[in-house]
Amino acid sequence: MALPKLQIALDTFDLPSALSPLQKAQAFIDIIEAGTILCLAEGMHAIRVLRSLYPEKPILADVRIAEAGSIISRMAFEAGASWVSVVSGATLTTVEAVMNQAANYGGEVQIELIDPWTYEQAQQWRAMGVPQVIAHRSRDAETKGQLSWSAQDLDHIRRLADMGFLVTVTGGVTLDDIPRFAGVPVGIFIAGRAIRDAADPAAAAAQFQETIQRTYAAALT
Ligand code: 5RP
C-alpha cells in the first residue's frame, strides 16, 4: 500500500484568499485543488495562475462536470489542470468525452461519487479506463450531522481500491479523522478548511503529513 498523498482544497470566493494559505503550506502539499467554489468565482483564470505559480504540482480542477464534458474539460486542461472531476450522475457519454480530452492533454479524470451511485457504474467507469474516484462526505450531509466516516464508507473505499481505482477521501477531513483510515487503501486525503483556515497553514499541513505517515507506517513496513 502506498503512502496517501495530501491535497489542499481551495474553495475560496477569490484567488488572493486561496493563494495566501497555499503559499504558506505549499512545501507540505502534494496536490493542489482549485475547488468548485473557486472555479465558479474566478473561472479558469484561477487554474492558469495556480499552474504558473506551481508548475511542478498536480492540479485538480474540481469542476464537477455533469454535461458538456468535452468543452468543460478542455477549458480546464488548456488552463493547466492535470485532473478534472466528473460527477457520478454524468452519463457514460459524458465520461467518455472527458476521457478523450484527458487523453489529448495527458490528464486524468476523477469521478466524484455522489449518492446514489452503483458498483455497476463503477465497473463501467473502470472498463473505460477511469483511474480515480472521489469518496466524498458532502457539505450538505455534514451540516445535517453526518460528522464522521462510517464502516460502510471504509468498505466502499476498500472495494473501489480493489477494483483498481485510486481513491481520494474528502469532505471536512480533519487531523482526528486520519487514524480511522489505518489499513484502508486511500490514495489521497483532501483537506480544505482544516489547512486553509488554520492560524498556521504550514504547520497544519505538516501535521497532516506526519499523521498520515504515522497512520500508515505499519502498513508500509
Ligand atoms: C466542497 C468540496 C471541497 O473541496 C472538499 O469538501 C474539501 O474541503 P473541506 O476539507 O473544507 O471540506 O468538495 O464542496
Image (tube, rainbow, N blue to C red):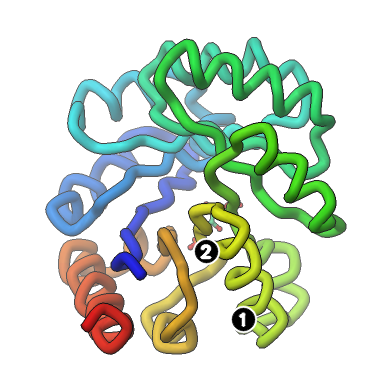
Give the residue drawn at x 64%, y 11%. 71
Front one among 154 and 49: 154
In this rendering, position of residue 188 left or right of residue 147: left
Residue 117, quarter of the rendered image = bottom right
Q: Amino acid at mark 1?
A: Trp
Front one among 42 and 59: 59
Q: Is residue 166 above or below residue 219?
A: above
Front one among 123 and 186: 123
Give the residue drawn at x 53%, y 69%. 172
- Describe the element under mark 1 as helix, strand or loop: loop
- Residue 49 lies, in percent from the top left, at 29, 23
- Residue 66 lies, in percent from the top left, at 76, 31
Residue 190, quarter of the rendered image = bottom left
Q: Are marks 2 and 1 in contact (CB under 8 Å)?
A: yes
Residue 146, quarter of the rendered image = bottom right
Res. 169 mark: 2
Precedes in sequence: disc 2 or disc 1: 1
* Placement of the N terminus among the 4 image quadrants: bottom left
Q: Is residue 77 above or below residue 118?
A: above
Ligand 1, image quadrant it occupies: bottom right
Gap between marks 2 and 1, in whole Å?
A: 10 Å
Q: Is the residue marked by circle 1 packed among few (<14), some (14-19), or many (20+) residues within 10 Å?
A: some
Give the residue drawn at x 67%, y 87%. 151
Front one among 162 and 100: 162
Res. 149 mark: 1
In this rendering, position of residue 195 left or right of residue 65: left
